[in-house]
Image (cartoon, rainbow, N blue to C red):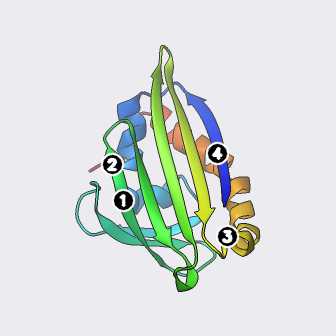
């Protein structure tokens, strides 16, 4: 099992951050490691979709928990069902904006191999993606149409 977490602070509000999380089709605007995301319906607990990494095959994702303006968790099964990739995103309001956390984990028999293959890159790029998300949210532009 492998885990990584990164924390950022922003002057954006929880609704401003959430507007960007709640629009998966536009995740590539702030996460350059993502090429495309589709979701079958609204982003709610149980929703399913696909995520195409910038470098890698398209994978199915399932939103296992979605709480507007608080956070969400999405899960993907990796090759042969021998590993699971879990992303967790949390927003905590502060007096001057928000603290937000992204956590990623890889579990299963192939986790050591997949940690080397994709985990290290995810960990390296996570701070940049989160800073981009904060900048968009701070600019006040809502992603939800």
Q: Are marks 1 and 4 in contact (CB under 8 Å)?
A: no
Crowdedness of circle 3 by 10 Å Cα count: few (<14), some, many (20+)? many
Q: Residue at x 56, y 56 (%)?
A: 31
Residue 132 vs 52, above or below: the answer is: above
- Where is mark 2, residue-wise? 66
**Which callout, 3 or 2, points at the residue further toward the start of the chain?**
2
Instruction: Find residue 53 and report its horizontal and vertical position in percent.
Output: 56, 71
- Mark 4 or 3: the one toward you: 3
- Where is mark 4, residue-wise? 5
Q: Residue 38 — which label? A: none
Crowdedness of circle 4 by 10 Å Cα count: few (<14), some, many (20+)? some
Residue 141: tell me if it is visible: no
Q: Are marks 1 and 2 in contact (CB under 8 Å)?
A: yes
Q: Examine the image and state in which quarter residue 105 appears.
A: bottom right
Along the viewing direction, whichever of 102 and 145 lies nearer the viewer: 102
Quarter in which the N terminus is drawn: bottom right
> What is the distance, in whole Å, between disc 3 and disc 2 at their CAs?
25 Å
Q: Residue at x 53, y 35 (%)?
A: 100
Q: Residue 111 — which label? A: 3
Instruction: Find residue 136 and report its horizontal and vertical position in percent.
Output: 49, 41
SS assignment at label 3: helix
Q: Residue 63 — which label? A: 1
């Amino acid at each position: 099992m492998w885990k990584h977490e990164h924390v950022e602070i922003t002057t954006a509000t929880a609704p401003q951050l959430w507007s960007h999380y709640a629009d998966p089709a536009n995740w590539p605007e702030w996460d350059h490691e993502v090429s495309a995301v589709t979701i079958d319906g609204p982003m709610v607990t149980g929703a399913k979709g696909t995520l195409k990494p910038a470098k890698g095959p398209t994978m199915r994702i399932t939103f296992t928990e979605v709480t507007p303006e608080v956070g969400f968790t999405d899960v993907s099964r990796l090759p042969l069902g021998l590993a699971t990739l879990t992303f967790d995103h949390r927003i905590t309001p502060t007096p001057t904006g928000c603290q937000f956390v992204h956590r990623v984990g890889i579990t299963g028999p192939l986790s050591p191999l997949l940690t080397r293959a994709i985990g290290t890159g995810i960990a390296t790029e996570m701070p940049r993606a989160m800073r981009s998300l904060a900048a968009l949210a701070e600019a006040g532009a809502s992603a939800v149409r």
